[in-house]
Amino acid sequence: MQKIAIYGKGGIGKSTLTSHLAAAFARLGKRVIQIGCDPKADSTSNLLGGQPLTSVMGYLREHDEPPQDLAAISRTGFGGVLCIETGGPTPGLGCAGRGIIATFDLLEDLSLFETFAPDIVLYDVLGDVVCGGFAAPIREGYAEDVLIVTSGEKMALYAAGNIADAVENFRDRGYARVRGILFNRRNVPDEEEKVRAFAAARSLPILADFPRSDAINRAEEEGRTVIEAAPHLPISEKFLALARSLLTSEPQES
């Protein structure tokens, strides 16, 4: 079982990239779980036809007791990907990070990994603040590899640096490593130069370089990924190439 956490600044496109990567792994015949660790609970929508999924925190608020089985808090999406959302607290009440920790504890109680037996587990994690529950995938040993999504925008690179530092701080415990960077272009001035300089300074490979894509936007309007909607397009092949690369023992720079 390969466990990958995908971090990035809010709004950088990490959920889009995560769901596309999940679809690509599924297209390659892998059993995949995607766990959205964001209070918005929309990480998996493009795998579910745009339909919302009851989050773990939402279920707990509504029923005031934990679910008795996985079916109550999960749904199977495109390619057989098992979709789960942690969700968050009522706005203004509680801590979203604690929701992630509570979700992970519950999934262990429900024997998620033993029951589903995945090849790949993807955690889609908000990376603006890498502390508390948002650090759980790397701090508690849930993820082995971390992918950092960034553009050439100043705040995206700032968040990427914080994420890399957080992973480094836990490295001596034998937890996750940063596998590399996913470059999600925003077409800002000198973008490629900035991202490549950041990667070089951190000695990290750029695993994939994704251009802005109208095809992705059109597919998302339909609640789908391009892997499902237009598998023949070059942008779809980029995700499939990334998935193949991640299945190898060592990262391959794009």
Image (cartoon, rainbow, N blue to C red):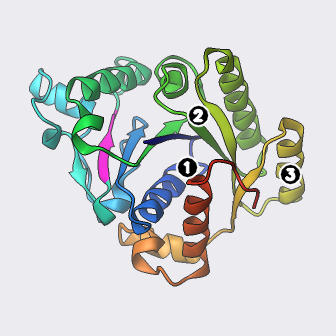
Residue 40 placed where, x, y %? 39, 41
Query: Does 127 appear above or below 71?
Result: above
What is the quadrant of residue 39 in the picture? Answer: top left
Confirm or deny contact between disc 3 and disc 1 (CB under 8 A): no
Where is residue 37 drawn, in percent x and y? 42, 36
Circle on res. 127: 2
Tell me if mark 3 has few (under 14), some (14-19) or many (20+) residues whose alpha carbon lies within 10 angstroms of its own: some
Q: Quadrant of residue 17?
A: bottom right
Residue at 89% over, 58% down: 190
Q: Secondary structure at mark 3?
A: helix
Residue, disc 1: 14
The residue depicted at 67 percent of the width and 42 percent of the height is 179
Region of the chain picked out in magenta, as a range: 82-87
Q: Relative to 216, say whether 206 is above or below.
A: above
Residue 239, x across and y down, in percent: 56, 65
Choose top left, top right, bottom left or bottom right for residue 236. Answer: bottom right
Mark 3–mark 1 Cα distance, whole angstroms, equals: 19 Å
Circle 2: element type: loop
Instruction: Report the residue at 35% width, 66% height from top.
Output: 223
Asked if marks 2 and 1 touch (Cβ < 8 Å), the reply is yes
Label 3 – label 2 distance at C-alpha: 20 Å
* Residue at 51% over, 70% down: 217
Q: Amino acid at mark 1?
A: Lys
> In this view, which residue lies farthest toward the front?
249
Q: Against 245, is 214 above or below?
A: below
Q: Is residue 31 visible?
A: yes
